[in-house]
Image (spheres, rainbow, N blue to C red):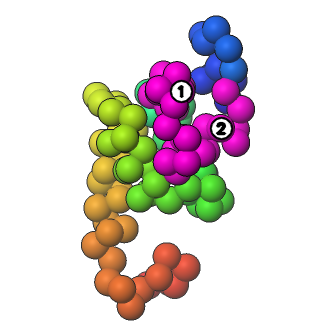
């Protein structure tokens, strides 16, 4: 949160950021914070959000499109990972070991 909030005139809290990523909040004033998450936060932190079940790859993929996030290494990685997740058969679950 510090990385995202440091250059900004006011702060976004974790709950608001997660709601933005899940499509629950769509106020344009938060776009720059969502963009900062994908641009400035290390991919390991974003991966932790997924592993800890705060968001899914699908949530992040939708957020990228909704908030028009472009030209980010993290964006490309998320799109790639989401395509693997979406390609999983319905018989397989995210919790099941392959």
For the residues marked 1 and 2, what is the alpha-carbon distance in whole angstroms?
A: 9 Å
Q: Which residue is mark 1?
A: 30
Q: Residue at x 53, y 27 (%)?
A: 30
> 10 Å neighbourhood of mark 1: few (<14), some, or many (≥20)?
some
Q: Is residue 57 magenta?
A: no
Return the x and y of residue 88 as percentages of the image width and height.
Answer: 33, 77
Q: Which residue is mark 2?
A: 16
Regarding residue 45, the answer to whether it shows in the image is no
53 with respect to 66 (left or right):
right
Q: Quadrant of the N terminus?
A: top right
Q: Residue at x 50, y 59 (%)?
A: 56
Q: Residue at x 61, y 44 (%)?
A: 18
Residue ranking furthest to the bottom: 91
Return the x and y of residue 75 as percentages of the image width and height.
Answer: 35, 40
For residue 32, above or below residue 8: below
For residue 51, above or below residue 41: below
Q: Residue at x 36, y 57 (%)?
A: 81
Q: Quadrant of the C terminus?
A: bottom left
Residues under numbered marks 1 and 2 in contact, where contact means CB atoms less than 8 Å apart: yes
* Magenta extent: 12-37
Return the x and y of residue 12 as percentages of the image width and height.
Answer: 67, 27
For residue 39, above or below residue 17: above
63 with respect to 95 (left or right):
left
Regarding residue 28, the answer to whether it shows in the image is yes
Q: Quadrant of residue 91?
A: bottom left
Q: How many numbered marks have been drawn onto this rendered protein structure?
A: 2
Return the x and y of residue 46 as percentages of the image width and height.
Answer: 54, 45
Q: Is residue 23 magenta?
A: yes
Q: Which mark is residue 41?
A: none
């Amino acid at each position: 949160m510090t990385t995202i909030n440091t250059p900004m005139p006011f702060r976004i809290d974790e709950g608001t950021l997660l709601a933005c990523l899940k499509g629950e909040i769509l106020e344009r004033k938060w776009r720059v914070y969502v963009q900062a998450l994908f641009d400035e936060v290390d991919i390991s932190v974003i991966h932790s959000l997924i592993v800890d079940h705060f968001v899914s790859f699908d949530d992040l993929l939708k957020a990228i499109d909704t908030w028009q996030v472009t030209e980010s290494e993290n964006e490309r990685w998320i799109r790639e990972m989401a395509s693997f997740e979406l390609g999983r058969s319905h018989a397989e679950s995210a919790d099941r070991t392959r």
